[in-house]
């Protein structure tokens, strides 16, 4: 089997930029369960990155948590996170959309990764969401490009 050349933008590097942009957006841990926060702020994905590739760069699927609450969430406290989503009027529809989207797949081409990377570095997370939505609607995400390559 021919070894595949890995060059250009790696998806894990784009993920790191996306996660950092999420933390810059939220600025604080979203968990309000009465227990104190501790540790550094991290990006938490409602639907995990590994199992739901279509949602790994979807802003409404990502929130900032302190390391303590992030660890708690991944230890099985999903209910409080779901409740938090549902009590946030801006997120309620999104949660339904996330459920509908999660089983789709996205092929992250280099131009698309480049677009996502640039948008994350410029804190244009809304644009990243639009790119993912465009793919899900069957349109070409590169159409959102300003033409640079
Ligand atoms: Zn916290």
Image: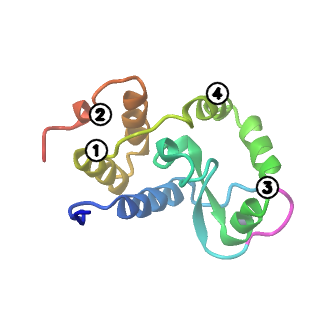
Measured as percent of width and height from the top left, residue 97 is found at 59, 29
Q: Distance between the residues labelled 3 and 2?
A: 36 Å
**Label 1 or label 3, whichever comes before in sequence order:** 3
Which label's residue is closer to the chain start, 4 or 1?
4
Q: Which of 27/100 is in front?
A: 100
Magenta segment's dominant SS is loop
Q: Residues within 10 Å of mark 4 (few under 14, many from 20)?
A: few
Q: Residue 141 carries which label?
A: 2
Q: Which residue is rendered at x = 33% and y = 48% of the image? A: 116
Between marks 1 and 3 in the image, the one whose residue lies nearer the viewer: 1
Q: Give residue 32's mark.
A: 3
CB-based contact (under 8 Å), mark 2 and mark 1: yes
Give the color scheme: rainbow, by chain, secondary structure or one colour: rainbow
| Alpha-carbon span between mark 1 and mark 3 | 35 Å
Tell whether label 2 touches label 3 (CB within 8 Å). Answer: no
What range is drawn magenta here? 32-37
Q: Mark 1 points at which residue?
A: 112
Q: Ligand 1 is located in which of the four quadrants?
A: bottom right
């Amino acid at each position: 089997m021919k070894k595949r050349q890995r060059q250009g933008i790696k998806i894990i590097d784009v993920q790191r930029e996306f996660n950092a942009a999420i933390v810059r957006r939220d600025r604080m841990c979203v968990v309000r369960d009465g227990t104190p926060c501790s540790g550094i702020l991290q990006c938490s994905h409602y639907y995990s990155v590994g199992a739901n590739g279509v949602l790994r760069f979807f802003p409404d699927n990502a929130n900032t948590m302190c390391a303590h609450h992030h660890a708690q969430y991944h230890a099985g406290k999903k209910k409080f996170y779901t409740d938090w989503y549902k009590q946030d009027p801006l997120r309620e529809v999104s949660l339904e959309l996330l459920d509908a989207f999660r089983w789709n797949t996205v092929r992250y081409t280099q131009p698309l990764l480049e677009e996502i990377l640039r948008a994350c570095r410029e804190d244009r997370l809304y644009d990243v969401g639009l790119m993912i939505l465009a793919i899900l609607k069957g349109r070409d995400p590169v159409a959102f490009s300003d033409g640079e390559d």
